[in-house]
Amino acid sequence: MTRKRILALDPGERRTGIAGTDGLGMMAFPIETIVHAGFPALPDALTNIIEERDPEILVVGLPIDAQGKIGPQAQKVMVLVEKLRAAFPKLEVVTQDESHSTDVAHAWLKEAGMKAAKRKTKADTMAALAILKRYMGEY
């Protein structure tokens, strides 16, 4: 089976967590959290990491509400997805339900023994990892 290199985003208004796969697209790991000036600035903020990592797929976490509907925040993310598609036309940009990804991230970090204050600083990248693993079918 051929796998593709993937980057996943847990997009936020000011901070976005990023996770990715290795060069073979087999192992997923957290990369970093970037700080940016809102969703409109995110494509520019991602340019260097996309050039460096050279992914084939960009997975964007979509906040689906408890009823399975797309609310106001998810609508903002859908606008972001279109901007990402325009900014990176060679990338396949897809969405993935990000429900409970932050809760999963905090649980993983707590299980690893990380104190609450430090968990907060790592939660965005770990939430991106949860989104990526969900997309890859690993949980």
Image: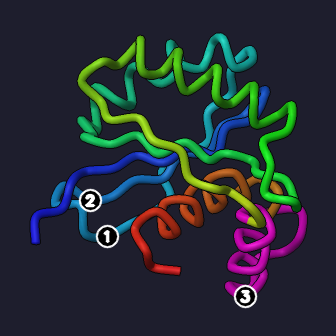
Residue linked to disc 1: 27
- Residue 51 placement, left or right of 3: right
Q: Which mark is residue 111?
A: 3
Q: Residue at x 50, y 12 (%)?
A: 44
- Circles 1 and 3: CB atoms closer than 8 Å: no
Q: CA distance from mark 2 to mark 1?
A: 6 Å
Q: Residue at x 80, y 62 (%)?
A: 118
Q: What secondary structure is marked by label 2?
A: loop
How far across and how far down the image is residue 47, in percent?
Answer: 40, 19
Q: What secondary structure is marked by label 1?
A: loop
Check the image and report above or below for 100 versus 92: below
- Report how many numbered discs are placed on residues in the image: 3
Q: Which mark is residue 22?
A: 2
Check the image and report above or below for 27 versus 90: below
Q: Which mark is residue 93?
A: none
Chief secondary structure of the magenta portion:
helix
**Amino acid tagged 2:** Asp
How far across and how far down the image is residue 53, in percent?
Answer: 28, 39
**Structural crowding at the residue carrying mark 1, measured as other residues with C-alpha within 10 Å and reported as few (<14), some (14–19) or many (≥20):** few
Q: Residue at x 76, y 77 (%)?
A: 114
**Amino acid tagged 1:** Met
Q: What secondary structure is marked by label 3?
A: helix
Q: Nearer the viewer, residue 74 or 139?
A: 74
Residues drawn in magenta? 101-118
- Circles 2 and 1: CB atoms closer than 8 Å: yes
Q: CA distance from mark 1 to mark 3?
A: 20 Å
Q: How is the image coloured?
A: rainbow
How far across and how far down the image is residue 10, in percent?
Answer: 64, 46
Q: Is residue 65 magenta?
A: no
Q: Residue at x 68, y 30 (%)?
A: 77
